[in-house]
Image (tube, helix red, strand yellow):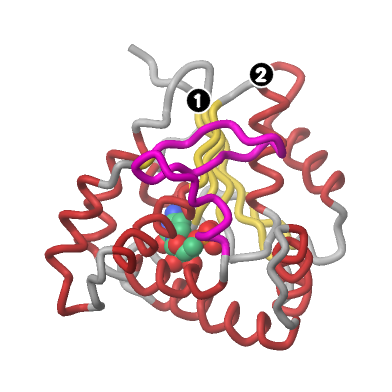
Amino acid sequence: MTEAPVITIDGPSGSGKGTVSQKLATDLGWHYLDSGAIYRALAYAAELAGIEGSAGKEQIVSLARELKLKFSPADDGGAGVLLAGTDISDSIRTEECGAMASKLAADGEIRAALLQRQRDFRQPPGLVADGRDMGTVVFPDATHKFFLTASAQVRAERRYKQLKEKGINDSISRLFTVISERDARDAGRSNSPLTPATDAIVLDTSDMSLDEVIGFVKQHVGYQSL
Ligand code: C5P
């Protein structure tokens, strides 16, 4: 049986990959995987359970395997994230949760425990998957792969706006620092580092509008014929 087609959109935080992926999935009528939300939900659940860092490693791996996570369509085209029936969509969006997720995500066993859960999203008619290792590790045979980047300053500004829309107030300068730290950790780890797949199209979105990026991606995937 041929597997459903997958479009992967990887990149650092604030590169626009989430918004682009959601819009593309909606327009295509395909499924959408926000893999970062899985890492964030795990970090959130670990904190809730009072499991601390490396001392609780085995507990976190078990938690990752058993995580009662569900995604439900949200009004904005994204996905509501439910942990054991509780909506944690907004709680996991903070930079603190992102940083905790990034620390857990550096561990190979934790990543392995979350792998199949991500691959299960590959269902007909197709999947748009966004993250850090979608094109390199999770869906190496994806039909189309993109890697979006943007300057650190632009990414901090975008993150600032996104958080503000969710009612979270932060400063651009602080976001610049924490996002840079997180990206350095994600890019520098040995397990599934943040890096473009060799067959990915790399696009710097610093000076592009959202519509321009979506237009670029659609053109490359032959949107009309999908
Ligand atoms: O994409 P988002 O910012 O929500 O991801 C949060 C963190 O989860 C990232 O900084 C990264 O460490 C981790 N992550 C990952 N692999 C993915 C998606 C996210 O390691 N595919």
Q: Is 11 on the left-hand or right-hand side of 75?
A: left
- Kindly give the residue lying farthest to the front in the view shown: 86
Task: Return the disc, 1 or 2, that comes first in the chain's sequence.
Answer: 1
Measured as percent of width and height from the top left, residue 132 is found at: 48, 58
Q: Is 54 on the left-hand or right-hand side of 102?
A: left
| Quarter of image, res 176 | bottom right
Q: What residue type is labelled 1?
A: Pro
Task: Identify the secondary structure beneath mark 2.
Answer: loop
- Tell me the magenta residue range: 70-93
Measured as percent of width and height from the top left, residue 13 is found at: 60, 65
Q: Residues within 10 Å of mark 2 (few under 14, many from 20)?
A: few
- Kindly give the residue lying farthest to the left in the view shown: 58
Name the residue nearer the viewer: 206 or 35. 35
| Quarter of image, res 51 | bottom left
Q: What residue is shown at x 35% (from left), y 65% (from top)?
A: 105
Q: What residue is shown at x 58% (from left), y 82% (from top)?
A: 178
Mark seen at residue 226: 2
- Kindly give the residue lying farthest to the top in the view shown: 1
Q: What residue is shown at x 56% (from left), y 72% (from top)?
A: 95
**Residue occupied by mark 1:** 5
Tell me the distance, in whole angstroms, between the alpha carbons under discs 1 and 2: 10 Å
Q: Is 153 on the left-hand or right-hand side of 48?
A: right
Confirm or deny contact between disc 1 and disc 2 (CB under 8 A): yes
Q: Is residue 24 magenta?
A: no
Q: Which amino acid does label 2 sit on?
A: Leu
Question: Where, quadrant-wise, is the C terminus in this rendering?
Answer: top right
The answer, for residue 217, to whether it is visible in the render is yes
Measured as percent of width and height from the top left, residue 185 is found at: 44, 78
